Amino acid sequence: MSATRVLFDEPGPRTRRRILLASVISLVAIAGIVYLAVARFADSGQLTGAKWSVLTTPLVRSFLWDGLVNTMKLTVVSGVLALPLGVLFALLRLAHNKALRWVGTTYVEVFRSVPLLLLVLMFVLALPPLGINLPIFWKICVPIVMCNAAVLAEIFRAGVNALPKGQLEASLAVGLTYWQAMRLVIFPQAIRLIIPALVTQLVSLLKDSTLGYAASFPELLRTANVLTARTHTLIQVYIVISLIYVIINLLLSYLARVL
Amino acid sequence: MDIVLSNLSPLLAGLWITLSIAVLSFIGAMVIGTVVAVMRISPVAPLRAVGLVYVEFFRNIPLLCLLFLVVFGLPDIGVLFNLYNSAVIAMAMFSGAFVCESIRTGINTVQVGQAEAARSIGLTFGQSLRFVILPQALRSMVQPLVNVWIGTLIGSSLASVIGIQDVTAVGQNLNNRYAGGLAVFASIAGIYVVIALLSGGVGGWIERRVAVQR
């Protein structure tokens, strides 16, 4: 229940008429905008069947599918690696030891605000001459893990801090050690609190995987980019892969709500 | 480090472009986000639907994908902007969705009782919004909006992929020209971190300044 809902009185007959009128006007306006957009496509000859049917040929489909599989691989591997690292840095930031806390805080503050692209470029351009030449997959995966671990650490910390203090005090009072209390009492509850934030971060991680483009890793966006050069159907390809990304991310958020 | 010091002027020029893109995009995002947020809480159903679709689309599309769509895709249907404007438009649309959600969440954090109390002592819709709801909601929006700003700043580095000479692109050029680009990239990373930390600090300061003393 939100505050906006009680701000209005129940609309009377006149207000209802006005809302109806506004609805009709906005519907017409929306239809007009959609019509203009479609006309724009039609005028520039982008609506012809040939421009779109290219995308349904088996070769193109399997090409895009491979890209999608690589995107998923990158997302899953990065996610699986970033989660425990995030927990680790959260624990460091929550630690009693000042030095440990400093390490955790520095890591989080730095890697939360460094652009991922800059890290990818370091791994692609600056580190190989120094002898650190990872396989392409890891040149994009490691930076994603580094950045996301920092954000995940903040999410975990927020979850732990959101629990009432009594939880930790009670666990210590019944004789658990600090780490037992964390493992058995605090974390299981904190995890439940932060599931929505974790899913948001997973969506963001999937979006990060598009930076594989800069490392020439053939994930979906890179694949699409290569494809546009072959098929000369720029806007069609980009619209289709945008929709693929949006749908996958919506599915992820939906699953999180259901589970 | 010498590379950085002897190339200060291209780096500063790049930094200027990064900052200008980020600031312009954020201003655009604030405008778009406010409009979409109003649409999402309006009593007019079609506008609510448009707002919902807008937010769900732009929150879930990767920024790089959106940049490609705007920069390479739109010219296909005869919509032409120069590179710089395309980047600003794409980023403003992207961040606008996040601004909208920050504003909506901010309004929703105000407890229902506050609005009920305002209404029951006879304040009109406009008055309760102006004197009761917004003053509280705006305060709780400071931190989320600062986060959107930092996200916009960091995201502006993607403009280098489409060929804009922002500070990330300058770093790339310097790395190509000289050996040992690690120092260059590290310095640029440092610049981003400093700006982000400063922004966070300013956000915290504003939040403390406007905090309600209870």
Image (tube, helix red, strand yellow):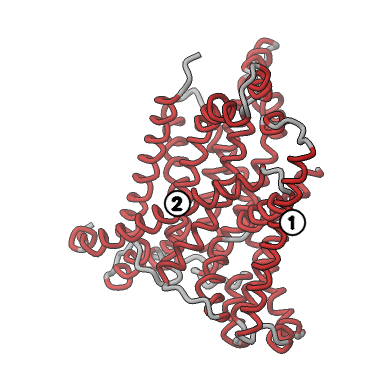
Kind of residue indicated by mark 1? Val
Disc 2 from disc 1: Cα separation: 32 Å
Q: Nearer the viewer, residue B212 or A154?
A: B212
Circle count: 2
In the shown orientation, is residue A106 left or right of residue A34?
left
Q: Residue at x 47, y 36 (%)?
A: A104
Extreme residue in the left direction: B6
Residue B74 visible somewhere in the drawing: yes
Residue B126, numbered circle: none
Q: Check the picture and name the quadrant holding the N terminus of chain A.
A: top right
Q: Is residue A153 above or below residue A70?
A: above
Q: Nearer the viewer, residue B73 or A221?
A: B73
Q: Which residue is mark 1?
A: A24
Quarter assignment of residue A232: bottom right
Extreme residue in the front direction: A14
Kind of residue indicated by mark 2? Phe
Q: Which residue is mark 2?
A: B26
Q: Secondary structure at mark 1?
A: helix
Q: Secondary structure at mark 2?
A: helix
Q: Is residue B209 above or below residue B38?
A: above
Neighbours of disc 1 within 10 Å: few (<14), some (14-19), many (20+):
some
Residue A180 visible somewhere in the drawing: no
Neighbours of disc 2 within 10 Å: few (<14), some (14-19), many (20+):
many
Extreme residue in the top direction: A173
The answer for which chain carries disc 2 is B
Q: Position of residue B112 (x, y in %)?
A: 68, 25
Q: Nearer the viewer, residue A171 or B109?
A: B109
